[in-house]
Image (tube, coloured by chain):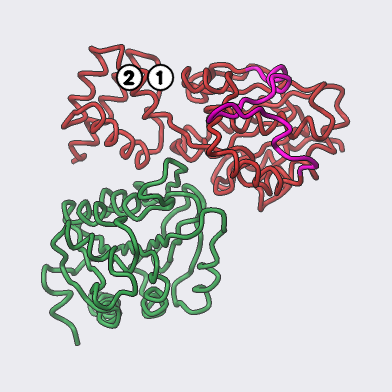
Chain colours: A red, B green
Amino acid sequence: MPDQSDIEMRLLLDAIYHRYHFDFRAYATPSLKRRLRAAMQRFRCDTLSQLQDRALHEPALFPALLDYLTVHVSEMFRDPSYFRALRETVLPVLRTYPSLKVWVAGCSAGEEAYSMAILLHEEGLLARSLIYATDINPRALQRAEAGVFDVASIAGFTDNHRRSGAPVSLSDYYMAAYDSAVFNKALKKHIVFSDHSLATDSVFAEVQLVSCRNVLIYFDRGLQERAIGLFRDSLCHGGFLGIGSKESLRFSRHADAFATVSAEDRIYRLQGATA
Amino acid sequence: MNAPIAGQRGMRDIRAIAIGGSAGGVEALAELLPALTARGMLSIFVVVHQPRDRSSLLPGIFASRCAFAVCEPDDKQVVRPDHIYFAPADYHMLVDAGPRISLSADDLVHHSRPSIDVLFESAADVYAEHLLAIVLSGGNEDGADGALAVRRAGGFVVVQDPETARVPMMPRSALAKVAADAVLPVAEIFALLNELCEKEIVDDR
């Protein structure tokens, strides 16, 4: 017999899907449970059924609930060795393309999208690049669009950036204002922020690089397969896919379509390249 | 022998052990983990607080000393018996149905990622009365809420005797929150684990 709270969770996720068209039904259960427990406290609900009732009848509450369901903590240049590998191994190949399209999937508040723009700038590729930065949470996308980060995080970002093999300091890219760091608008000109769901939307462009890090961990295996399938269908032949340092294509039926570029940094390349 | 310890509340079908520690926890682990006899029954999960930006050295340290296979798992990795899973640095490690490993990069809990509470709570959901949680030496309150969740799910909680812990705060916080099944110095936790391993031999016959 399924656990009572498992039943309630399924009903709540169904309700959210039917009411708001956000599909969390195939998200990984353990993290989702934790987030929903936190949301129950925040909205003073004793049960998930009560939370479901509020979610259905108080649409004004939904954006805040969505923040609980989607909160993805990120930082700029998280895992510097990943960005170093892009810099040293991937971009030299992509340099041969006349124009570049990069998809940062699950961009949250934009840390990774700006990191990518800075990386491309430093490698002399930004002028002919377009970065699609997508997420399902409109509030996160608004924050990303603003390009303003808490100055308290900047020291960590700066250290990561330096360790990614950057030729200059991160401070070249932002202005500090009170407790905020406002990133250079020139970076933003090459980023298109848009609403896209890996759970329900389809491929929207052909790209040479997909970077989707620490997003798949929140999906169950079925949804992971869907997302990896979208990446595969978006990538041009010989295009690159980068995922989180603890995510793996090992368990995916799409694994054979990709060659491993860096096992350590989880960078893969869609087979079929002539190069 | 310490037969009464495991016998107290019928600790007879333990399939997983979740262990959490912080400051002083590694020393305790160094006594405990090599004690385990691989019998094809137990999976072990370990969270040790460590600096966020340093990838873990622990699996390497323990691999050569343990009868169990030691690893730092990927997300969705299948959980097997005779394996010890160390939470990777900067990720929460949870257990999902299957059982499989489920990782998350969500907010820090008690200033920590990985957090012991996060591991314990998810393991309690999956293993219920087949889980033994062990709280070792450490300097904050992580693990206390998780230990409570383990008890509520019918699982067992053993806490390192605070008097014997290098940093007693973590065991004390757990004891303030939950009625532990046993409060033991590491040497006796060691005996208990041996007993659990031996018990399986008996059960096999």
- Which region shows up in magenta? A166-192
> What chain does mark 1 sit on?
A
Type of residue at label 1? Answer: Phe
Q: Mark 1 = which residue? A: A22
- Left or right placement of residue A238 versus residue B195 in this view: right
Q: Which mark is residue A127?
A: none
Among the 4 quarters of the image, the one containing residue A15: top left
Q: Which mark is residue A16?
A: 2
* Residue A14 pos. (x, y %): 31, 22
> From this viewpoint, is residue A266 visible?
yes
- Marks 1,2: beta carbons within 8 A: yes
Q: Nearer the viewer, residue B76 or B39?
A: B76
Q: Secondary structure at mark 1?
A: loop
Q: Nearer the viewer, residue A180 or B49?
A: A180
Figure check: B60 above or below A13: below
Q: Secondary structure at mark 2?
A: helix
Dot 2 surroundings within 10 Å: few (below 14), some, or many (20 or more)?
many
* Total marks in image: 2
* Residue A192 pos. (x, y %): 65, 17
Among the 4 quarters of the image, the one containing residue A11: top left
The tag earlier along the polypeptide, 1 or 2, is 2
Figure check: A152 above or below B187: above
- Left or right placement of residue B55 versus residue B110 in this view: right
Type of residue at label 2? Answer: Ile
Q: Nearer the viewer, residue B12 or A40?
A: A40
- Left or right placement of residue A246 versus residue B188 in this view: right
The lab-note entry on whether marks 1 and 2 share a chain reads yes
**How far apart are labels 1 and 2 at the CA level?**
6 Å
Figure check: B111 above or below A19: below
Residue A178 shown in magenta: yes
> Could you tell me which residue is drawn at 26 percent across and 30 percent down?
A42
> Could you tell me which residue is drawn at 27 percent across and 77 percent down?
B189
